[in-house]
């Protein structure tokens, strides 16, 4: 029987092993740089959990679908904080965008660019709108007046085009004399859904007004329609309004005023009588008298010609747009035209105003705030994808070896303690 | 320039030209109070004619029963749909007379709905001059015989929120049917409400 006080050689060996293991762990911990990081390869499914960890490892994400905006932003933030980010995968180059209604009665269009043949499903908050295959080139889908956020699904990939905004359009200001032209222009715009502020001069010092014309402020007005010389007293303010981004529609009589010479797309010529007497469906404006636009400025865009003269033209001035329509008695189109003339007349005037208005005017059913092009967004945020290489050989030692040394030390000490208890020693 | 021309409607039945001096008087009034570009002479246009569409304001009056032809009804409907304004005045200044019964029946058929009283607060009464009590009374309503001929309101029919038909029993046809030079004998010009009618037609 061995003495309880004597120790077995194996216990000494175990003690030695424990000391060596502890020393090795301490040495490794001492030699390991504080900022030494590893690399983790993960799929996009595992990304949310990985993002929650406080690790500074290099993250290499493999995904075949576009990352959600939140995940992209997290990765970008992590990279900006010093972490390394890489991604790889076959994310298809798909882009969707929304073309908002150009005028109150208009509809929203979805613009889609996707690899040909991909099936796509378009929905809004109410439900399915359309289901089709992407054509070979960019396509448009008329959404009418979508409710909430339109979404497009390509296989497992879901793209949302967020729509929000106010429910009211900014106003159109119509300035003119009391007369048939002003009456019918105002009527046409109101019937098309525009909110109209009017200032119609009934005599030099007196005007019939509707709404407040306190300022040509782009927060309340988007377009000014100047029909005749009664707008001249406002010419300077109108010019400032246009240069700041507002729109201007110049009627045929206003076009003749030199007060608008800096804004109009050309000088005014001598009035041209109509080619025909009767307004027809096919060419209704041929029966209207107009002030031709002569000597157009260099940046003027001719929109319409009648009898060889320019009847309509447009240009940009500062941040705004000016559309000049030389017709002086367009109301005759509505009153004397064939069946349906009142509708085409309304749409024409509404289109003129829409052409002069900037897009943000149209806060109708919903203004688009985001364009969904996920691959572009990923490249812009995270950089170009990388080619995937071998994983295991590049892996760097992480915290596992340190734990191994600790386990060896603990195991050696436990066994040594057990042996001592077996032989009766304390 | 599109001038304003005072247009009187000719219709097959009745006496459409019962107030021959009225157009010149109203033209004078418009020129007197406003700078509206007004034609110095009026026009008379057949209700059944396409030419009616060239005049977005039309005046119709008479004493006798009114019966529109089918062509007149169709043209009037088209005229109203396009945005024209028809002002009808009963030249009889009586209550429930023949012109009133037949003209309102015809108009009701044309617009497919009843003519309803125009409230005193309507923009018509503030379009130029202010008439807080609604349509001004005429001397024919206030003839001193106590026969209670005052009609408190005009009747109207609206299209897209605008008055397309204004109907009067006030007998403005008699009230305004005089040579414009005679306005100088009046303490208050009794044609001022005509300015409201025209300005309303030109702005609404």
Image (cartoon, rainbow, N blue to C red):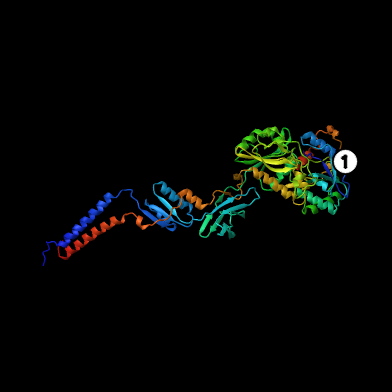
Q: Is residue B174 left or right of residue A302?
A: right
To which residue does mark 1 refer? B20
Q: Is residue A26 left or right of residue B184?
A: left
Residue A336 image point, x, y percent: 78, 47
Q: On screen, A155 above or below B133?
A: below
Task: Identify which residue, A92 or B201, lies in the foreground.
Answer: A92
SS label for mark 1: loop
Could you tell me which quadrant the C terminus of chain B lies in? top right
Q: On screen, A182 above or below A338?
A: above
Task: Identify which residue, B55 or A7, lies in the foreground.
Answer: A7
Task: Identify which residue, A96 or B179, lies in the foreground.
Answer: A96
Instruction: Determine the residue positioned at 80% across, 35% down.
Output: B31
Number of marks drawn: 1
Residue B12 image point, x, y percent: 88, 50
Instruction: Determine the residue positioned at 27% across, 51% down.
Output: A29
Could you tell me which quadrant the N terminus of chain B lies in? top right
Name the chain under label 1: B
Residue B161 image point, x, y percent: 71, 48
Crowdedness of circle 1 by 10 Å Cα count: few (<14), some, many (20+)?
Answer: some
């Amino acid at each position: 029987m061995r003495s309880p006080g004597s120790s077995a050689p194996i216990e000494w060996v175990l003690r030695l092993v424990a000391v060596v293991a502890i020393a090795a762990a301490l040495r490794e911990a001492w030699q390991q740089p504080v900022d030494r990081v590893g690399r983790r390869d993960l799929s996009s499914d595992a990304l949310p959990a990985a993002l929650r960890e406080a690790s500074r490892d290099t993250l290499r994400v493999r995904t075949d679908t576009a990352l959600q905006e939140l995940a992209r932003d997290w990765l970008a933030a992590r990279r900006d904080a010093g972490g390394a980010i890489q991604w790889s995968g076959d994310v298809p180059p798909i882009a969707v965008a929304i073309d908002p209604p150009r005028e109150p009665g208009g509809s929203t269009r979805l613009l889609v660019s996707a690899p040909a043949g991909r099936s796509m499903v378009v929905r809004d908050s109410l439900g399915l709108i359309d289901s089709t295959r992407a054509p070979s080139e960019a396509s448009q889908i008329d959404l009418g007046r979508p409710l909430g956020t339109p979404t497009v699904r390509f296989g497992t990939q879901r793209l949302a085009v967020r729509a929000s905004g106010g429910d009211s359009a900014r106003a159109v200001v119509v300035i003119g004399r009391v007369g048939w032209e002003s009456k019918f222009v105002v009527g046409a715009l109101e019937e098309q859904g525009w909110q109209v502020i009017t200032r119609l001069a009934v005599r030099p010092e007196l005007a019939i007004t509707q709404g407040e014309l306190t300022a040509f402020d782009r927060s309340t007005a988007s377009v000014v329609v100047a029909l005749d010389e009664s707008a001249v007293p406002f010419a300077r303010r109108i010019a400032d309004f246009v240069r700041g981004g507002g729109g201007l529609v110049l009627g045929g009589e206003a076009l003749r005023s030199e007060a608008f010479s800096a804004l109009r797309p050309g000088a005014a010529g001598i009035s041209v009588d109509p080619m025909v007497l009767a307004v027809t469906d096919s060419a209704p404006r041929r029966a209207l008298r107009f002030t031709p636009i002569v000597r157009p400025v260099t940046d003027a865009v001719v929109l319409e010609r009648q009898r060889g003269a320019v009847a309509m033209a447009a240009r940009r001035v500062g941040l705004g747009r000016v559309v000049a329509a030389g017709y002086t008695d367009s109301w005759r189109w509505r009153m004397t035209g064939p069946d349906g003339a009142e509708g085409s007349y309304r749409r024409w005037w509404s289109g003129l105003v829409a052409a002069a208005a900037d897009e943000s005017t149209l806060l109708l059913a919903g203004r688009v705030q985001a364009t969904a092009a996920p691959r572009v967004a990923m490249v812009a945020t995270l950089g170009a994808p990388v080619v995937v290489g071998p994983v295991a050989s590049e892996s760097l030692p992480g915290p596992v070896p340190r734990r191994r040394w600790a386990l060896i030390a603990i195991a050696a000490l436990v066994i040594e303690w057990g042996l001592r208890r077996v032989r009766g020693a304390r | 320039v599109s001038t304003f021309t005072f247009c009187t409607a000719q219709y097959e039945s009745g006496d459409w030209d019962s107030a021959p001096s009225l157009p010149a008087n109203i033209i004078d009034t418009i020129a007197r109070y406003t700078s509206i570009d007004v034609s110095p002479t009026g026009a008379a246009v057949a209700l059944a004619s396409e030419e009616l569409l060239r005049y977005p304001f039309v005046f119709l009056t008479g004493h006798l029963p009114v019966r529109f032809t089918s062509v007149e009804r169709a043209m009037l409907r088209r005229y109203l749909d396009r945005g024209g304004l028809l002002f009808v005045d009963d030249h009889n200044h009586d209550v429930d007379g023949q012109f009133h019964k037949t003209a309102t029946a015809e108009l009701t058929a044309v617009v497919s709905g009843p003519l309803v009283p125009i409230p005193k607060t309507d923009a018509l009464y503030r379009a130029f001059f202010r008439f807080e009590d609604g349509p001004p009374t005429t001397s024919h309503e206030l003839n001193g015989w106590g026969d209670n001929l005052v009609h408190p309101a005009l009747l109207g029919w609206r299209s897209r929120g605008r008055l397309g038909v204004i109907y009067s029993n006030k007998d403005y046809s008699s009230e305004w049917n005089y040579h414009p030079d005679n306005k100088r004998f009046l303490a208050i010009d009794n044609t001022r409400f005509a300015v409201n009618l025209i300005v309303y037609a030109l702005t609404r």
